[in-house]
Amino acid sequence: MIHEYVHLSVPARHHAEASERLTEYVVKAAAGGTMLGCWATEIGALNRILLMRGYETDAEFMAERCQLAMSSDPFLCEGLMTGYCAEAYLPFDWLEPVPAGHLGPCYELRTYDLRVGTLPVLMEAWKRKLPARAEMSPVITAGTALGGVPRFAHLWPYSSFDERLRIRAEAVKAGIWPPNAFPGTLPLPMQTLICLPLPCSPLQ
């Protein structure tokens, strides 16, 4: 499966209207892919909606990308959306499929740049360390970008921002996390988004 994160820019206080249009687009307009989550950003780049979709085949993914490129009304958000950026990721094949349900409502999408050729080392470190970390709180998915700068992204749910701070601090104190795949090296650029689910999101 391919995971896609679409970052849509919308005017402030118009997230609810955009959510309704996205629901119509994904559910009623026979758009490609399956909606896995839909959030409004709260910390990070603001006035954004994060739409996550999954594609079972490469052909389905490419057909949807071509349809969007030719569309005069992408995501049925004409006159509301001021721009969008779509990024495709290949999830680590040993992770479970993305679930649905009430896992949040505080979601964090973390994106890290990668040094060229280091993905196998990173994946092995995650595979080794994640089980203990997942006992503290689950990861929804993690995977590597299929285009652009080499990078990977991982998505985590928490019941609150305070819980996120507590769990991360406890994991570091216990030596459970981070996986420390590249000890002794300076980290490359990292960024995070804290998001809250919109009504249309399968992940709440």
Image (cartoon, rainbow, N blue to C red):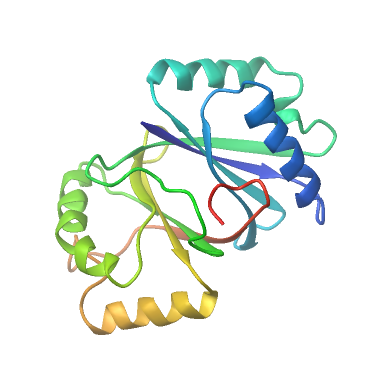
- Choose between 152 and 20: the one closer to the eye: 20
Image position, residue 137 (x, y; %): 35, 68
Image position, residue 13 (x, y; %): 82, 56
Image position, residue 8 (x, y; %): 66, 42
The answer to which quarter of the image holds residue 67 is top right
Determine whether, in the image, residue 204 is placed left or right of residue 116: right
Q: Residue furthest right?
A: 79
- Choose between 83 and 165: the one closer to the eye: 165
The answer to which quarter of the image holds residue 172 is bottom left
Q: Residue furthest front?
A: 101
Residue at figure coordinates x 53%, y 74% from the top left: 160
Residue at figure coordinates x 20%, y 63% from the top left: 131
- Choose between 75 and 152: the one closer to the eye: 75
Residue at figure coordinates x 26%, y 68% from the top left: 133
Q: Quadrant of the C terminus?
A: bottom right
Determine whether, in the image, residue 143 is placed left or right of residue 19: left
Q: Is residue 65 above or below residue 202?
A: above
Image position, residue 17 (x, y; %): 80, 45
Determine whether, in the image, residue 163 is placed left or right of residue 130: right
Q: Is residue 66 visible?
A: yes
Q: How many marks?
A: 0
Residue at figure coordinates x 17%, y 67% from the top left: 183
Q: Quadrant of the N terminus?
A: top left
Q: Is residue 180 visible?
A: no
